[in-house]
Image (spheres, rainbow, N blue to C red):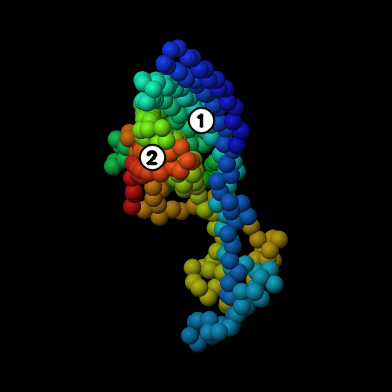
């Protein structure tokens, strides 16, 4: 992660008022390798080393050993997902505040302030980011790409992968064609957090204090990655089921392995069309209509401080409420 920050704060004292104000701008770059199985996911079963019973057309129980198959270099199943390498997410954060500490009397001091925070919607440097159009979800299996970028222009997606999803029935349009924001999600501009505080001197040895504040934070990037890594057409698994090539579980047991069955020669074809079942689609998509790019938490606190250093404080913290897009589950 790389971030560039410009920040400044000022203090102005006039009479019984001490006014503090300031602001911050932050440009954040998160380069995330979201798919951690770059090496693939493979199986060494017992098919190649088990015994076959022609009378029952079955593998003889308790024969064969996966470790022996591995020692021979004979996998029974190979699979690899399209690894897009790194996602290059970008986001801008802006925050401004003003706070007045007002000494009303020798006993009473009030703190009154307001902070505004804004986070832009995440963007991906290479536009490898798709969304749905909730208005057409019930009638179309379709994704929306950022701005004017077409799906074919997004780097790192094999043509066979696009063709496989197209054969399944997936279609795509750009955000501009669908009338959606260029970044696919609109920023949340109403993150106003009040700051209220009070200090009252009860006597020569004790002070009563109370405060309230609301605080915001951006959507955790991990929640976006959880959907992006499985959203069509950015994800597809290519397979080579060596141990069951004819569709039966006994193929490897009753067939002699060929030269292309061994590690070093065996391959996973990523050029052909992968047949997807009719129900294949993402299990979780975000509904951008209700998107709120922030997390809200509220805190109350009160306490009494005595001159001998003892402090009795009670704090109430409201659970953080994430204000974001709702999820839509698909069959």
Q: Which residue is mark 2?
A: 303
Quarter of the view holding residue 175: top left
Q: Residue at x 57, y 22 (%)?
A: 6
- Pick the front one: 36 or 7: 7
Quadrant location of the N terminus in the rendered image: top right
Q: Residues within 10 Å of mark 2 (few under 14, many from 20)?
A: some
Q: Residue at x 39, y 20 (%)?
A: 102
- Choose mark 1 or mark 2, whichever is in front: 2
Is 21 above or below relative to 194?
A: above
Labels 1 and 2: the sequence-earlier one? 1
> In this orientation, does residue 6 appear?
yes
Q: Residue at x 46, y 37 (%)?
A: 307
Is 331 above or below relative to 58?
A: above
Q: Which mark is drawn over residue 259?
A: none
Is 48 above or below relative to 185?
A: below
Residue 123 x %, y %: 50, 31
Dot 1: element = strand
Q: Residue at x 41, y 25 (%)?
A: 115
Q: Which mark is drawn over residue 91?
A: 1
């Amino acid at each position: 992660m790389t971030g560039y920050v410009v920040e400044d704060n000022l203090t102005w004292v006039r009479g019984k008022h001490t006014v503090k104000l300031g602001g911050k701008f932050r440009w954040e770059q998160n380069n995330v390798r979201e798919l951690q199985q770059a090496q693939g996911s493979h199986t060494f079963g017992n098919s190649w080393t088990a015994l076959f019973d022609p009378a029952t057309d079955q593998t003889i129980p308790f024969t064969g050993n996966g470790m022996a198959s591995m020692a021979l270099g004979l996998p029974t199943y190979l699979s690899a997902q399209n690894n897009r390498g790194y996602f290059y997410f970008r986001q801008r954060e802006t925050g401004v505040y003003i706070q007045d500490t007002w000494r009303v009397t020798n006993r009473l001091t009030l703190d009154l302030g307001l902070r505004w925070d804004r986070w832009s919607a995440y963007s991906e440097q290479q536009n490898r980011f798709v969304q749905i159009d909730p208005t057409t979800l019930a009638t179309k299996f379709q994704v929306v790409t950022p701005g004017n970028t077409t799906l074919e222009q997004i780097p790192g997606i094999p043509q066979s992968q696009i063709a496989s999803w197209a054969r399944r029935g997936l279609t795509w349009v750009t955000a501009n064609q669908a009338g959606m924001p260029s970044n696919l999600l609109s920023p949340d501009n109403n993150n106003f957090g009040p700051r209220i505080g009070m200090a009252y001197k009860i006597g020569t040895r004790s002070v009563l204090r109370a405060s309230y504040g609301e605080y915001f934070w951006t959507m955790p990037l991990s929640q976006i990655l959880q959907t992006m890594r499985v959203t069509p057409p950015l994800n597809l698994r290519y397979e080579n089921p060596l141990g069951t090539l004819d569709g039966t579980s006994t193929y490897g047991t009753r067939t002699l392995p060929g030269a292309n069955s061994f590690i070093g020669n065996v391959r996973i074809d990523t050029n052909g069309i992968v047949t997807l079942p009719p129900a294949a689609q993402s299990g979780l998509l975000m509904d951008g209509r209700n998107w709120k790019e922030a997390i809200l938490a509220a805190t109350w606190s009160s306490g009494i401080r005595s001159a001998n250093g003892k402090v009795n404080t009670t704090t109430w913290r409201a659970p953080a409420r994430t204000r974001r897009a709702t999820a839509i589950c698909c069959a």
